[in-house]
Image: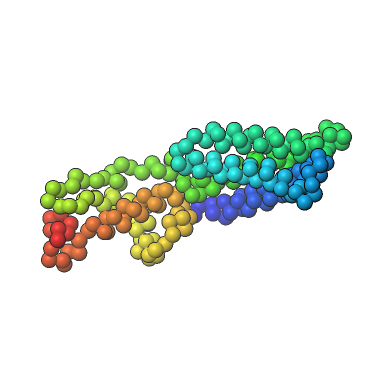
Amino acid sequence: MKNTHITYLIEITIIVIAASSFFLSYTNLYSFALSIGIPPLHCPLFPICIDFFLIACSLYILYAGENKLDEREGWAFLITFTIVSIVFNVQQSIADGFWGIVGHATPPISLCISLHIGMKILKHELFGTAKDLSIPIENFAIDEPSPEIDIAIIAPPVKNELHSKIEKYLDENPGAITSHMAKEIGVSYNTVKKYRVLIEESKKNTCNRDAPTCNRDIDICTG
């Protein structure tokens, strides 16, 4: 895959930043929970209620985007709980002045930003982008079904370089995982998935020419 090593490096960096931000924010929120009288045994739950909710909101935004749902609700909760986290984080540093407040406000902000960037990368890796799906319409041509045949006749996609590359990969690696194929070939998950479906359907609906029940004119089995 193009820039695979750069992608992995970015992903690792984002994970390290998010984990560090969560840990620092957790420490501040834990101290705040103690200061407001929450029983020590229950204090570890307080940071989880806030910062884990940021992770939940980020995952919901990813889910909503893939399933054509309204993302605004997820964004509203994400922004709201980021502000709540910032407010509670800085409570222990008000006496330290401006820079103390800025320092304690940094972890929840960096957590929110790193989650956002991480989800965008994950969305691209799993589902691709609209640009990746701009495959010529002739590659998905479908013939009208014949009344004499009780199956859909699907025309094979026009062979181009990408089609040939995916077809060759499937021939050499039967049962390959689509996401792994996308990384190996260097295109999005959805692009590989669409080509793969067409290639497999084309093979499924194509007769063995040696079969006695095969109609050679349309290359489709009728019996």
31 to the left or right of 178: right
The one nearer the camera, 64 or 169, is 64
The residue positioned 63% from the left and 34% from the top of the image is 79
The one nearer the camera, 77 or 45, is 45
44 to the left or right of 126: right
Q: Is residue 30 visible?
A: yes
26, above or below 96, in the image: below
174, above or below 156, in the image: below
The residue positioned 29% from the left and 46% from the top of the image is 140
Q: Position of residue 7 (x, y in %)?
A: 57, 51
- Which quarter of the figure is the C terminus placed in? bottom left
137 to the left or right of 120: left
Q: Is residue 99 visible?
A: no
The residue positioned 54% from the left and 52% from the top of the image is 3
The residue positioned 71% from the left and 48% from the top of the image is 45
Q: Position of residue 42 (x, y in %)?
A: 75, 49
